[in-house]
Image: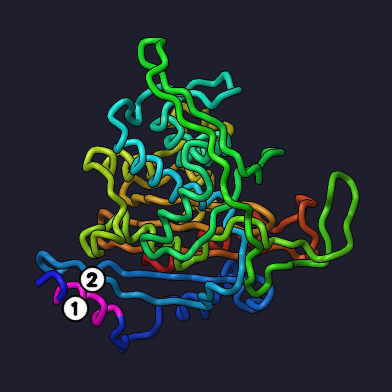
Amino acid sequence: MRCFFLIAIILFSGCKNDSADPIETVLASNNPKIKTVADAIENHEVQILFTEIIREKDSVYFKDYSFQVDDNSYFYPASTVKLPIAILALEKVKDNPLIDRNTLFNVEGDSTKTTISNAIKKIFAVSDNAAYNRLFEYLGKDYINNKLIDKGINCRISHRLSVDNSTDLKTKPLIFYAQNQVVFKTDAVINQPIKPLKLNEITKGKGYMVNDSLVNQPMDFSLKNYLPVTALHQIMKRLMFPELYPHNQQFHLTPIDRSFLINTMKILPHEAGYTTDDYYESYVKFLVFGDSKKPLPKHIKIYNKVGNAYGYLTDCAYIINEKTKQEFLITATIHVNKNQIFNDNNYEYDTVGFPFLAALGRQLIE
């Protein structure tokens, strides 16, 4: 019976839609925030996956649409890699009877004590890099990739973010505490060397900055993280709708941990203790609201993870409109680097990227 149900979902998702493709309709819009990109689409590496969630009685169906999605065309995923790391950290900690997600820990050599729960809150509230790096030390590169590959997710997460030792193969031990006593310590692990990616467009641009000097050659991304749009979308589907996937493709979280994670994914910065002066409500909500710093409407719930680096803006979001009872999944990426120089902090985020993703999201969920 379960096999028949899954087949029905796949067939429904693959059926030809008689109505217009919603992505194509949006990209044909005269909205200047969209038209600016659509008229020069070849310059922006746009990839979009859009899924309508259809509920009929006790069944859930996916109706999928895509635009220029190509797992072989590389884009830098930036902080979107924090989504699978948060999930895998919860999956791993549940199997250790000595600790849980609320057990205090520090990375060896780091005086900051935190918890896995707190790290995850920081990741989704403001996309905190240090929080991600601590969970990366807990998991390790090989563990991360083996787990994701085993679930049928095509990706390669190879490094920490924004630190000098980002590509160190050896993870540092984590020390866990209860009542000021050490209750558990992870081992340092030496991971396998990072293999260069062999993908299209793996070298990019015409130059990049190193300190204050310009290197006049394309930038090589072959050793960097790889998390394509398809993988992000599949991770979100598996998290939000685990019952639609075989057991070996699911993330195995406790119901309490899964509920904690999903609720944390929609957290706003001020709800996590950050000031609104520095972190406005849409700070990490690129789709729908990324072009505004106004308070978000209460009836739109966005569970998401964004990424922003090297001129790439990416958002993977599960969106619920509580007024219309509609649900959507959107994963979209855009590149805005007109001068084709990397690391010069001269990207068109505010003038092109954020306006495009916000308008795209609004029109897709209307």
| Span highlighted in magenta in the image | 4-13
Q: Nearer the viewer, residue 188 or 286?
A: 188
- What's the amino acid at mark 2? Tyr
Q: Find out whether residue 14 is within the magenta segment.
A: no
**Would residue 77 be found to the left or right of residue 246 on screen?**
right
Q: Which residue is mark 2?
A: 61
Residue 301 numbered tag: none
Residue receiving disc 1: 8
Q: At which x and y percent is residue 142?
A: 51, 50
Looking at the image, residue 33 lies above or below residue 255: below
Distance of label 1 from label 2 (alpha carbons):
9 Å
121 or 143: nearer the eye?
143
Residue at image point 60% right, 22% down = 109
Residue 67 shown left or right of residue 200 in the figure: left
Position of residue 336 measured from the top left corner of the image (x, y, whole percent): 68, 63
**Residue 95 x %, y %:** 30, 38
